[in-house]
Structures are given as C-alpha cells and as structure tokens.
C-alpha cells in the first residue's frame, strides 16, 4: 500500500549527506529514533502554514502532506511488521519535498522527518542497519547547516545528542550537541532535557557502561517536546 501511494510523490536521489557523516560538535549529530505524535503534528502544522507562494508553494505543501500520510500509514503498522521497502517509500516522499523545493517553508520539516525515520529504521531489530543511524546523523547535519534559523533547530540538536549518546556511542558529539541546546535555547524545555541528558552522561561515565555497552536508561523528553527511547532502541541494530 505504501509503495503504491508514494507514486504521488516522485522520488529523487538522496544527497551526499544521507550517506552518513561522522564527526562531533556542530557538524556531527543524529536524530531521535522515536518521538511523540504531538511533537510531529505540531511541526507538520507549522510546515503547512509556513512560507510558500503561488503554484510552487501549493505543490510543495501537497507533497509534504502526501509524505505525512504515508508516514501515518507506516506508523500504524507495528514496528516488527515494517519492511525496509516501506521505509524507503516514505523517505522518498519527504526527500522529494526539499530536493524539489529547497526554499519552501516545509523543507526543514521534511529534512527532520527523514532524519527521524532513518533513526527509527536503524533502531528497529531485524530491519535496521548502523548505516541508517549514520545517515540520520548526516540528515541532521544537513538541516542545521542549510536551515540554521528554522523552528526545527532546537529539536534537531537535542535529537543529535540523544542519537550520539545512545546507539552511536559518540559521547563527544552528544556533549557538544546538548551544550549547544542549552546555549542557544536557554529556559526552553529542550534546554531542560539537554541538561538532564548531560547529567545522565556524566553519571554513566563515572559509573561505567552497562553490560550491553550503552546507557542504562533512555533520555525522555517532557510532553511539550516529545519523548526519546534511543538507549533501548539502539540494542539489536546490525552493523
């Protein structure tokens, strides 16, 4: 069903960032493997009313809505029943938005959706690959480099830190990402969660890693900002 529906949104080749970027700090970051539907709905509502004029604006908004519909269909299926082909169909739908209309108001939200889906796919046992997690990191790098003033930046930085500190086990990247959230968005729910994640990371470093090699607890975000479960989701990811 998903593969048929995606015909309404033409797929385009992925950009170089989607091959995955390594590194730390502002250029290396990742995405959350999961988030609340409320957080995504708010972002998609912003995208639907953002800048975009005339025929191009209408077309890009329609493409975004179509991709969001495909995503809803995918997420209605239990994680264990999803295939890589189904993920690819949804990913191509969102990619078409920012490749065809890179200056459209919903372009940053489309990039973030791709990053989130790649992280989610990469953390799904039996489906995910480490390459998916690295590709998610690259998508967040692309978002933050190309759309530094978009409303998605705070969430992207927080997602980066949680992905780096969880499945990717890149502690330096995680610390830099959380510090950037606190510095750029003081007093926000994102900064509050970043501070919690920083404390978790320090405790983990002081006490040693769990037998599984990752954080013993997932960093959850408040209801206003979404929730994360990357530490648990990182288990079972293939190399």
Image (cartoon, rainbow, N blue to C red):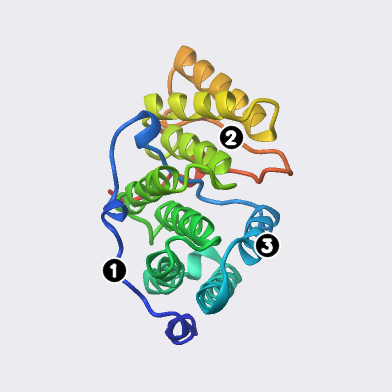
Q: Residue at x 46, y 39 (%)?
A: 160
x and y percentages locating residue 225 in the rendered image: 67, 43
Instruction: Answer left or right for 163 relative to 76.
Output: left
Q: Residue at x 61, y 62 (%)?
A: 47
Between discs 3 and 1, the one toward the N terminus:
1
Q: Which residue is mark 3?
A: 45
Instruction: Answer left or right for 238 relative to 152.
Output: left
Q: Where 185 sits versus 75, above or below? A: above
- Foreground mark, 1 or 2, reads 1
The alpha-carbon separation of the residues under discs 2 and 3 comes to 26 Å
Q: Could you say which is closer to the camera, residue 29 or residue 170?
A: 29
Q: Where 46 sits versus 77, above or below? A: above
Q: Which residue is mark 2?
A: 219
Q: Residue at x 37, y 57 (%)?
A: 128
Asked if disc 3 and disc 1 are in contact, CB closer than 8 Å, the reply is no
State the mark number for residue 83.
none
Q: Secondary structure at mark 3?
A: helix
The alpha-carbon separation of the residues under discs 1 and 2 comes to 33 Å
Between discs 1 and 2, the one toward the N terminus:
1
Can residue 74 be seen from the camera position used here?
A: yes
State the mark number for residue 13.
1
Q: Residue at x 44, y 52 (%)?
A: 119
Asked if disc 1 and disc 2 are in contact, CB closer than 8 Å, the reply is no
Q: Could you say which is closer to the camera, residue 178 or residue 146?
A: 146
Q: Where 235 sits versus 200, above or below? A: below
Q: Where 161 sits versus 108, above or below? A: above
Can residue 58 be seen from the camera position used here?
A: no
x and y percentages locating residue 70 in the rendered image: 53, 75
């Amino acid at each position: 069903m998903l593969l048929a529906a995606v015909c309404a949104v033409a797929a385009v080749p992925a950009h170089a960032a989607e091959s995955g970027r390594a590194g730390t700090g502002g250029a290396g970051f990742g995405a959350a493997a999961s988030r609340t539907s409320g957080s995504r709905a708010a972002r998609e509502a912003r995208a639907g009313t953002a800048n975009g004029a005339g025929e191009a604006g209408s077309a890009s908004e329609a493409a975004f809505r179509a991709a969001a519909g495909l995503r809803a269909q995918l997420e209605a299926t239990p994680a264990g029943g999803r295939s890589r082909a189904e993920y690819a169909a949804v990913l191509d739908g969102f990619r078409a938005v920012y490749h065809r209309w890179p200056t459209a108001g919903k372009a940053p939200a489309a990039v973030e959706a791709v990053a989130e889906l790649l992280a989610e796919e990469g953390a799904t046992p039996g489906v995910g690959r480490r390459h998916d997690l690295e590709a998610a990191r690259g998508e967040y790098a692309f978002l933050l480099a190309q759309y530094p003033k978009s409303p998605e930046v705070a969430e992207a930085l927080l997602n980066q830190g949680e992905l780096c500190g969880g499945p990717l086990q890149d502690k330096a990247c995680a610390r830099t990402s959380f510090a950037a959230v606190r510095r750029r968005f003081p007093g926000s729910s994102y900064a509050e969660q970043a501070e919690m994640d920083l404390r978790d990371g320090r405790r983990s470093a002081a006490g040693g890693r769990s037998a599984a090699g990752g954080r013993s607890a997932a960093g959850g975000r408040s209801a206003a900002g979404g929730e994360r479960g990357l530490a648990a989701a990182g288990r079972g990811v293939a190399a």
